[in-house]
Amino acid sequence: MEKNKEPMIKLEPGGKAPILSYNLPESTSYSGQNFIEMELPESYFKEEITKKSAGRERTKFENTELATVKAAVENAIQSGFSDRKIFPNVNLVTGSINFLKKPNAGFLISSQFPISPKLAQLDPEDVARNLQFGKRLNIYRSMFGTLTSNYIPEPEEERPRLLLIEKYRLSSYLGNYGAGRTIKTFSLLPGEKTRISFKSYTKKESDASSASSIFDSFTQASSDEFETSVQSEQSNKQSYAENYQYNTEVEASAAWGWGRAKVSGGVKGGSNSAREEFAKNISSATEKHAASASAKRDIQVNTSYEIKEQTGEETSIEREIQNINLSRTLNFVFRQMNQEFITLLHLVDIRVAFFNGFGESRSEVSLPELDNLLEEVIDEAKREEVRKAIIEQLQNIFDYKDLHHSFVEEKTLKDQQGKDLSNSAYLRVKKDYTSIFKDDATETEITVPGIILSSMKFVLRTDGIIVEALLGHGNALDRYSQGLQDEALRSHVLNNDLLVTNYQKNELGKKIVEEKDEGAANIYALVFPPVNVIEIEKDGENA
């Protein structure tokens, strides 16, 4: 056998063992974006930009017969929505969705991505009717990740504008965990026995779906419900509808808001009011979503005398319990456990875009490419003014505590000698910019990237149960019965004392033998004389 052979498994030399932490924040995070429209006069834009019509190439169907429109729609659908004159808001990767016409009627849909039931049941005639009313089909990716569809109206006018596209994350962390409402109480009489069953809201698929939330059980239902809540919070429905006109890319993040900001006249923080309104809307939508999901999280505790036979019904857990007390009742209190969530809305990135209301005009760039975008769409005489206004908006952002933050910086690259490189200056979001949230209740600190715009706390019911057993104070025995119980107890105590005495006697005898103490042995024999054993002879003989 080889000597010094390496073992199959060994620890890393000089390695450090991980530390078991009692409080390690774990987040559930979702991405979305908010659009802030910068209110600039139309004269600030280049003349060729204001005269250029992005929607001129769109085919109009308002005065076309339904059969003709339907035929055009079917041909465009079978070609993968490639006709941008009919479907300008559908920008799919070639071959990602295929609609094959069936011999009888309808389409057979195959997709590389998961699709919603709504998109799977897309009807060409329905698409055609909406086109006649000036509404275009829009295919986008939902918050859950599935491709779905809706119809959006044609823009009323072409209005050139610059947009601040703010990228957000909605991150949730676990907070306190504890007992909540009392869901059941019952008592067992002395000596009584029963069976109990627990039925959770997660047992039935329909119940589990309605009780799901984006915090701890992300599902298609919870995603759709949250997006609906966000949309219902928007005060300007027309502006919010432009989200879908802008988001023609199916990979785009979910659009959570659309606001406006005055940037002319030296207003440095004009975008903060739009940002604050957006944070308020998201907080309100999140609160409603949490309350709706928590309200449907019911747990039933049934005792055997309450259970009714129902076909197909199952219970999650069944147990048998007994009150072993002979004189007092045993009371059980069942409480549902609650989980607290700390939810933070934080700004993580910013981009700038040009948009005139039609999706075809969209031009989005990162901050380092800002100068290229301004050169393309802004008049030269106003270019520096607009650039300065954008930077001032991003260098004067206020968080949820109204603390000032400068989120962007002008960065100049340096050579090996530390000297500035010529023409290397560019605008960027500050690297590794973080914010800290401190929970006063637990003194837990949570660090997130970017700037925190909103902090929320929600308490949701869980499927956990905690049980407390309380002994009743009333004695159910009369004096005679109580005396019998006392004597029975006294008998058990005396028997235990006798067993202890015999044990001590045997231990003392063993000790005398081990020490070979003849005097102690004589005394032991006097105190504990040997028991005479009388042998009774069998077959009737005397002993």
Image (cartoon, rainbow, N blue to C red):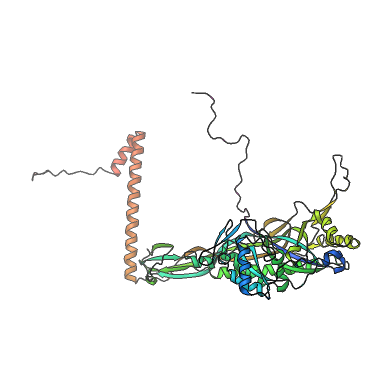
Quadrant of the image occupied by residue 395: bottom right
* Residue 394 % position (x, y): 81, 60
Magenta-drawn segment: 1-26
Q: Residue lying furthest left in this view? A: 540
28 up-or-down from 515: above or below: below
Asked if the magenta segment contains residue 23, the reply would be yes
Residue extending farthest to the right is: 381
Q: Is residue 254 at all visible to an observer of this figure?
A: yes
In terms of depth relative to the viewer, which is nearer, 385 or 290? Answer: 385
Which quarter shows the C terminus? top left
Does the magenta stretch mainly form a helix, a strand or a loop? loop
User: Position of 299 compared to 130: left or right?
Assistant: left
Query: Is residue 239 highlighted in magenta?
Result: no
**Residue lying at 11% horizontally and 44% vertically, measured from the top left:** 538
x then y, percent, for residue 409: 82, 54
Residue at 35% x, 52% y: name it: 497
Determine whether, in the image, residue 240 is placed left or right of residue 416.
Answer: left
